Amino acid sequence: MTTAKFAANQVSDLKNVAEWLIQQKETAPVMAFYGPMGAGKTTLIKAVCGLLKVTDEVNSPTFSIVNEYLTVEDESVFHFDFYRINKLEEAYDIGYENYFYGGQLCLIEWPEKIMQLLPAKYVKINITPDEDTGKRIITCQLIGV
């Protein structure tokens, strides 16, 4: 199992994390972001999308559940936010299998709501904020690889 650990004191520190994540996307295109509300999941996803040269505005799909973004190379990136789902059936309703097993990059916020639907291979990203300093410890693990 491959693991990487990063410390982020400011948004610019996320570039190294985003670069590492992008290097994993061929092996494990599904990436699950864990952390409490306000930990910086969406901010890290914005950093990943920025390096991938996404042309769309990146915002958390809190109400729509999934946003599709296009890169300058016309590749799709899917951004999920499962915070508001109440039943697993809601993930089935959006056709999660087409996304998770389609080979495109899938960036998932609140994956704990759909744990049993994650593929065998994925990247697990834990963001742990320090309330006093604002620093984030970000641990990334390749699961099932």
Image: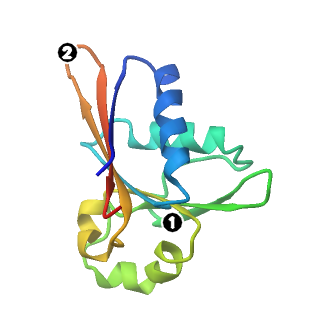
Task: Identify the colour scheme used.
Answer: rainbow
Answer with left or right where residue 18 lies relative to residue 39: right
Q: Residues within 10 Å of mark 1 (few under 14, many from 20)?
A: many
Front residue of 23 and 74: 23
SS assignment at label 2 = loop
Q: Earlier in the sequence, mark 2 or mark 1?
A: 1
Residue depicted at 53% across the width and 29% down the height: 15
Residue position marked by numbered label 1 in the rendering:
66
Q: Nearer the viewer, residue 27 or 60?
A: 27
Rendered image: mark on residue 132:
2
Residue at 30% over, 26% down = 136
For the C terminus, the quadrant is bottom left
What is the three-letter code of the residue carrying label 2? Answer: Asp
Residue 1: give x, y in percent of width and height. Answer: 28, 52
Amino acid at dot 1: Val
- Marks 2 and 1 sit apart, C-alpha to C-alpha, by 33 Å
Q: Is residue 24 left or right of residue 92?
A: right
Residue 45 higher or lower than 111, as above or below:
above
Compared with 36, 129 (above or below) is above
Residue 123: which quarter of the image?
A: bottom left
Q: Determine the residue located farthest toward the right in the rendered image.
A: 73
For the view shown, which residue lies furthest in the top direction? 133
Q: Against 12, is 43 above or below?
A: below
Asked which quadrant contains residue 122, the reply is bottom left
Give the image location of residue 139, x and y in percent: 29, 38
Name the residue rendered at 59%, 66% in the picture: 104
Q: Position of residue 16 (x, y in %)?
A: 50, 29
